[in-house]
Image (cartoon, rainbow, N blue to C red):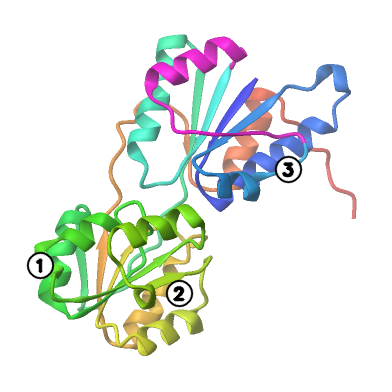
Amino acid sequence: MIWIISGTQDGREIGAELADREMKKPETERREIMMTVVSQYGKVLAAHKGLHIEVGRFKEEDMVRVIKEKGVTLILDASHPYAAIVSETALSACKETGIDYVRYERAETPLPDYEKIYHAKDEFEAAELAGKLGNSILLTTGSKTLATFVHAKALQNKELWARVLPVSSVLQMCEDLGLRAKNILAIQGPFSYEMNVAMIRDYHADVMVTKNGGLVGGSDTKLKAAMDEGISIIVIDRPKAGLTGVPIFYTPKDVLNYMEEHYGFYQEPKSY
């Protein structure tokens, strides 16, 4: 069995492509492919013929157990580039069980030369910085770190706009944090340049907090919109996962080529 840890749109697409390739083999020669995601919403998005989707968050001992129980021979880690602990845990589980580990990580978007771009090492530093830079803060970092911004002393008298996924569990979390309905921007991305500009203007945002999620994550349109509107941008830098001595790829094409070459995910030549 192949285990794909997915946390991004391109990770799901890579899994679907590998499943399609495997489905072209005779049924007796096909390998099972399991993809794990962290939410029911992610499961819906990842659904694809030939993929067995499971929902869960795994500690190292859980990963080791699953690897042994299901006969996993390879983990393809396509988790979110900001989920460094997931990658470190997966690599450790692979080492303990003696199976292969391959990492796909979405490439960062090159940051433009803009005098109002600020870097933060994590969400705590970003919250402190946002409190110094403005009064209307557009948070585009998702729900995972939302509590940090809501509870930050530096932001207690500021207007926070939380752009999050429109799923019940996230909305409930926003309500539990005390956010008013008008401050919850529940909508599925990625967002166009025009949508980002409209949000900045409509909510009179003077600071945008973001991550460098890459082109698929919409970082380019967010950055351009914020720059054109002349507001401050706080970029939370990617955490550095301790991945050494393992194959790491930054484009879907490269990781698919590697899987074809080393693990037999053959792609039939296209005829034109």
Considering only order in the chain, which callout, 3 or 2, is on the residue closer to the N terminus? 3
Q: In screen coordinates, is 186 left or right of 179?
A: right
Residue type at mark 2 is: Thr
Q: Residue 27: give x, y in percent of width and height.
A: 87, 22
Residue type at mark 3 is: His
Labels 2 & 3 near each other (Cβ < 8 A)? no
- Measured in 3D between alpha carbons, the distance from the residue under mark 2 to the one under mark 3, in whole angstroms, is 29 Å
Asked if the stretch drawn in magenta spans residue 199, the answer is: no
Give the labeled residue for mark 1. 154
Give the labeled residue for mark 2. 221
Considering only order in the chain, which callout, 1 or 3, is on the residue closer to the N terminus? 3
Quarter-wise, where is residue 70 in the image?
top right
- Where is the N terminus found, in terms of image quarters? top right
Give the number of the mark in front: 1 or 2. Answer: 1
Q: Residue 74: give x, y in percent of width and height.
A: 56, 21
| Image: 78 above or below 66 | below
- Measured in 3D between alpha carbons, the distance from the residue under mark 1 to the one under mark 2, in whole angstroms, is 28 Å
Extent of the magenta region: 50-72
Please tell me which residue lies in front, 250 or 10: 10
Residue type at mark 1 is: Ala
Give the labeled residue for mark 3. 48
